[in-house]
Image (cartoon, grey):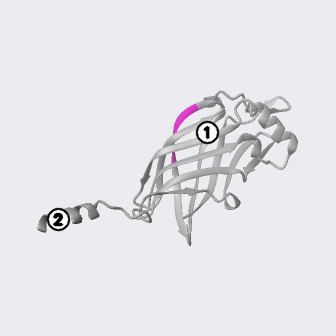
Amino acid sequence: MNRLSILILLALSSFVPRSLAPKKLMVDKSKSTVTYSMVHPMHKWDGVSHDVNAAMVYDEAAKQIQNVAVAIRVASFDSQNQNRDSHMIEVLDGIKYPNVTFTSQDVKPNADGTLTVNGKLTFHNVTKPITVQVTRREVGNQLLMNGKFDLKMTDYGIERPSLLGIATEDQFTLAFALAFTK
């Protein structure tokens, strides 16, 4: 009987209740955006996408993100100028390469509460490793993730868009505000 009790205790100690097991969280599209910011010598502008598709595997017990995946359609960005948006889709070969994606299985918490996320960004059919610093907050049943990082169009084989024969700056910024419901 003693051996049976030990076996039962060992079996129960390895059991993880479903509520504590890591779970898949989906982004709340109504509260999430990805924004690009570009500079031309004549003006600056932002393009915003509210059509963000993202999911993460989250370990509630450890409060740890195990992996994350994000996808945004190039055509979903709105800069408040339809001609500029059409030109950006053309420059980015948005019909041939319709999505910008980011994936990571390497999310590390920092002492200051931020996260260091190492992953892969695929843009214009070019995949490169990237490290992003992310601010994470929990508000009610929402896990909020914010961050931004700089990219160079030429690193991804993209010819810089131009206006009046003058090209934009090569570097631009991608910023994100993602809300996941727990």
- The residue that appears at 60% across and 36% down in the rendered structure is 122
Describe residue 1's horizontal placement relative to residue 180 as left or right. left
Q: Quadrant of the N terminus?
A: bottom left
Q: Magenta region's main secondary structure?
A: strand
Q: The residue under label 1 is which amino acid type?
A: Leu
Describe residue 171's horizontal placement relative to residue 110 as left or right. right
Describe residue 136's horizontal placement relative to residue 54 as left or right. left
Front-lying residue, 2 or 174: 2
Q: The residue under label 2 is which amino acid type?
A: Leu
Q: In the image, residue 26 lies at what x, y percent? A: 59, 56
- The residue that appears at 83% across and 50% down in the rendered structure is 80
Residue most toward the left? 2
Front-lying residue, 14 or 42: 14
Q: In the image, residue 35 lies at what x, y percent? A: 69, 50
* Dot 2 crowding, Cα within 10 Å, few <14, some 14–19, many 20+: few
* Dot 1 crowding, Cα within 10 Å, few <14, some 14–19, many 20+: some
Read off the residue under disc 2.
4
The label number, if any, that marks residue 151 in the structure image: 1
Q: Secondary structure at mark 2?
A: helix
Range drawn in magenta: 127-132
Q: Secondary structure at mark 1?
A: strand
Q: Quadrant of residue 64?
A: bottom left
Q: In the image, residue 74 lies at what x, y percent? A: 72, 40
Image height of 44 relative to 6, above or below: above
Q: In the image, residue 101 lies at what x, y percent? A: 61, 41
Q: Quadrant of residue 2?
A: bottom left
Please name which of the two marks, 2 or 1, marks the residue nearer to the observer. 2
- The residue that appears at 53% across and 58% down in the rendered structure is 135
Residue most toward the front? 1
Q: Is residue 159 magenta?
A: no
